[in-house]
């Protein structure tokens, strides 16, 4: 596996599937997710669980172990939902919390974070900012055609966090999953992607690529200009014959409709691209418009590289590679529950046996 410098930890593309998880399966998923989480936290701590969840390969395998289809967009939302349900009443005890979810639930993330404020050793406002910026980057700064509809923010009492969010592209019927790990993020707007898993590669507007540094700088300076000047520049661009990709990027841009946002950026004078991106009302069209002016008029190169690295396949719920064995599933939950119960009483033999089994399996020939 080829890895870039780790910051943002990954992205996964999955076929867009619709439908609901059977109640009998979701109940078991929540129980098994809880027990696996407890084992990891007991053995290695909350920060290690966050690291594993932020790894797109590990998360995919986790969802498959819970019994979901490897090739479905629902693996993301259902696995996150099961994890949230499984850990719902254990936050105080384990020191880890799950906020957000799918659709309207994702918009409750800031309130769910703030509600845990008294249990945290850091200012919860920092976590709210991280949650918001992760969503802004993947929906606005990286315009890859996937609209974010799921956002789960997982954090511990010490302020460590990870994000698992997903966007959909109904035109090609694919979903793309984005992973973040707080301890690796040094800059939200410069090369936040590292291990990216997907099967679909496009040509997005990538304003968080290293090669877009000058475009970010010029875009920020342009946001300080008077709105009328920016509108005139956009109107001039729309009358030019541009490279093919710019015809795509110019679609749906109505210069006069952006005038109100340009007035806001002019009044607030953002100091850098991250501050510009974080401004309320600054969305994909604003960033796209500024990036076009920066590239085509001021010569600041903009990246169209899709930050894709990996793709994968496992197994799960719809009978691929086999149907869920309910009896074996319940037995796995039972074994973990018993191992955790004994560990709490000082008998760690079963947990050691599970660790030894993992080492043995890792050494088997592939």
Image (cartoon, rainbow, N blue to C red):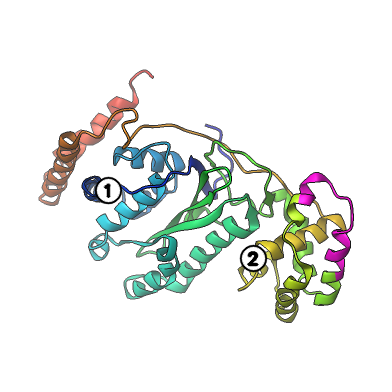
Query: Is residue 206 within the magenta segment?
Result: no
Q: Which residue lies at the image location 51% right of the left edge and 64% below the top edge?
A: 130
Q: Which residue is labeled 1 in the image? A: 33
| Sooner in the amino-acid sequence: mark 2 or mark 1 | 1
Q: Residue furthest top?
A: 365
Q: Which residue lies at the image location 74% right of the left edge and 62% below the top edge?
A: 253
In the rendered image of this protein, does residue 116 appear above or below residue 40?
Answer: below
Q: Which mark, residue 283?
A: 2
Query: Is residue 233 within the magenta segment?
Result: yes
Image coordinates of residue 346 in percent, x first then y, are: 12, 48
* Res. 121 in view: no
Q: What is the magenta range?
A: 232-247
Cα distance in 3D space between marks 2 and 1: 35 Å
In the rendered image of this protein, does residue 355 appear above or below residue 365?
Answer: below
- Main SS, magenta residues: helix
* Res. 313 in view: yes
């Amino acid at each position: 596996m080829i890895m870039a410098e780790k910051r943002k930890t990954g992205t996964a593309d999955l076929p867009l599937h619709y439908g609901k998880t059977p109640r009998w399966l979701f109940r078991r998923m929540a129980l098994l997710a809880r027990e696996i989480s407890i084992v990891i936290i007991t053995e290695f701590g909350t920060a290690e669980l966050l690291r594993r969840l932020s790894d797109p390969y590990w998360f995919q395998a986790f969802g498959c172990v819970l019994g979901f289809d490897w090739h479905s967009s629902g693996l993301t939302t259902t696995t996150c939902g099961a994890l949230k349900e499984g850990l719902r009443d254990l936050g105080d005890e384990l020191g880890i919390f799950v906020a957000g979810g799918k659709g309207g639930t994702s918009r409750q993330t800031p309130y769910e974070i703030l509600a845990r404020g008294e249990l945290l050793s850091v200012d919860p406002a920092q976590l709210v900012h991280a949650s918001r910026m992760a969503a802004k980057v993947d929906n606005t700064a990286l315009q890859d055609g996937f609209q974010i509809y799921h956002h789960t923010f997982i954090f511990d009492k010490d302020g460590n966090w990870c994000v698992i969010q997903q966007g959909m592209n109904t035109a090609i019927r694919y979903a793309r999953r984005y992973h973040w790990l707080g301890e690796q993020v040094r800059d939200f707007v410069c090369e936040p992607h590292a291990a990216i898993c997907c099967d679909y590669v496009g040509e997005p507007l990538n304003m968080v690529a290293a090669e877009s540094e000058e475009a970010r700088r010029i875009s920020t300076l342009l946001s300080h200009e008077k709105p009328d000047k920016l509108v005139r520049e956009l109107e001039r661009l729309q009358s030019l014959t541009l490279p093919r990709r710019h015809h795509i990027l110019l679609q749906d841009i109505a210069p006069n409709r952006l005038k109100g946002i340009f007035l806001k950026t002019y009044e607030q004078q953002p100091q850098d691209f991250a501050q510009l991106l974080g401004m309320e009302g600054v969305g994909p069209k604003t960033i796209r418009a500024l990036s076009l002016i920066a590239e085509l008029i001021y010569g600041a190169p903009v990246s169209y590289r899709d930050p894709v690295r990996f793709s994968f396949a496992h197994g799960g719920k719809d009978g691929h590679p086999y149907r869920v064995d309910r009896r074996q599933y319940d037995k796995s939950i039972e074994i973990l529950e018993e191992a955790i119960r004994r560990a709490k009483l000082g008998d760690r033999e079963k947990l050691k046996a599970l660790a030894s089994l993992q080492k043995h399996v890792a050494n088997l020939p592939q």
